[in-house]
Structures are given as structure tokens and as C-alpha cells.
Amino acid sequence: MKIIKKHDAGSVAALVGLAALGGIAIFNAAFGVNVTAPYRIIEITDGDTVVIEANFLPPELGHKLGLRIVGIDTGEKGGRAECDYEREMGEKAHRYAEDKIATARKIDINLIGWDKYGGRVIGEVIVDGRSLGNLLIQEKLAKPYDGQSAKTSWCKKK
């Protein structure tokens, strides 16, 4: 699979702009690429979701785009958590992601496609050459998730 390198930022913006307007299926079929670029992360929503600056989007859509990190699931925070343990793990994952992103010397974003729910993309966040998703799994702050099957509960069932 061809990856558009960081220095092709103009091409990336054009291709991703086409994807935003025409849908990721058309984008993938037409170009058959993953898009890698030095997008700026402007918010860490939780351990498995960030918001990137998306100046390539039409102004009507705003210039922010949610990015779900591919291949992982972290616990929910706050009221979305099903139990105290999930809430605690969700907060830890969020803090870990914040710390890794805040202290990174280099961050690359690999856009893979549109999320199944729409309104955000799935992709990989590479922090200093290492996958943030893999780091979260190694720290036991995330579980592997294929994006299709039911998520494994963070709460122990009796």
C-alpha cells in the first residue's frame, strides 16, 4: 500500500479534501492510499480519540476532525463509563495519551478511512516513531479492537 509521505502535504490536503467531499470509499478506490501527514492534534478527547486540525475541510464543516485511533478501545470516562474500574482506566488512558502527545518530538498521523459512524476518521497516531495505540495496549490501558465486533467490557460481570 502506498503511503504519501510527510513532505507531500499539498497532495495530502487535496486527496483528503476529495475524501471529505466524496466519501472515503471513492477516495480509497480512486487512490488506494493511506494518507500520512503532520496534522496538528488540537485536543485529546479520551485515550482512543483525538481531534486534529483539518484546514482541508470546507469552511462549512469547520476545521476540526475527530480521529479514532485504529485497533484499540480504551475505557470510557465520566458518566459514559459502566463502572468505576472503566472510569479509572479511561482517565488513565486519557492522561497517558496527553502525556505522550505533549512530550513528543514528532507526531505523524496516518489517516486510514472514515469511521463506521461517520463524522470522524480512523487512523494511527505515531508518536516519536511508535504507534500510540500499541503503547496504550502495552501499558494495559487499551484493549485490541477490530472496529467491527462487540467491544469487550471493562467491567467484571458477576
Image (tube, rainbow, N blue to C red):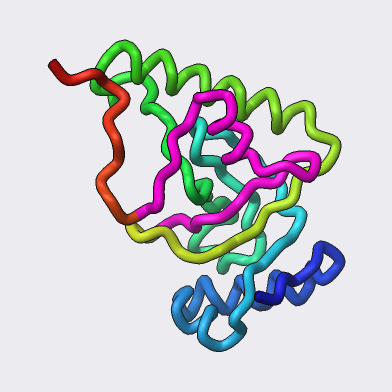
Say if 46 sits above or below 50 in the image. Answer: above
Q: Is residue 66 visible?
A: no
Answer with the quarter of the image where residue 31 lies: bottom right
Answer with the quarter of the image where residue 75 lies: top left
Residue at image x 47%, y 80%? 22
152 relative to 63 in the view: left or right: left
Over which residues does the magenta segment extend? 119-147
Quadrant in the picture for the C terminus: top left
Q: Was residue 52 drawn as part of the magenta stretch in this picture? A: no
In this view, the residue in front, 157 or 117, is 157
Say if 148 sits above or below 144 in the image. Answer: below
Residue 26 horizontal/vertical position (percent): 48, 83
13 relative to 145 in the view: left or right: right
Q: Is residue 110 visible?
A: yes
Numbered-mark total = 0
27 relative to 118 in the view: left or right: right
Say if 106 sits above or below 5 in the image. Answer: above
Residue 151 horizontal/vertical position (percent): 30, 41
Quadrant in the picture for the N terminus: bottom right
Residue at image x 70%, y 29%? 100
Residue at image x 58%, y 65%? 57
Q: Was residue 138 drawn as part of the magenta stretch in this picture? A: yes
Q: Residue furthest left?
A: 158
Residue 37 horizontal/vertical position (percent): 74, 60
In this view, the residue in front, 129 or 100, is 129
Residue 8 horizontal/vertical position (percent): 82, 71
In this view, the residue in front, 155 or 158, is 158
Say if 2 sits above or below 93 in the image. Answer: below
Residue at image x 41%, y 58%? 115
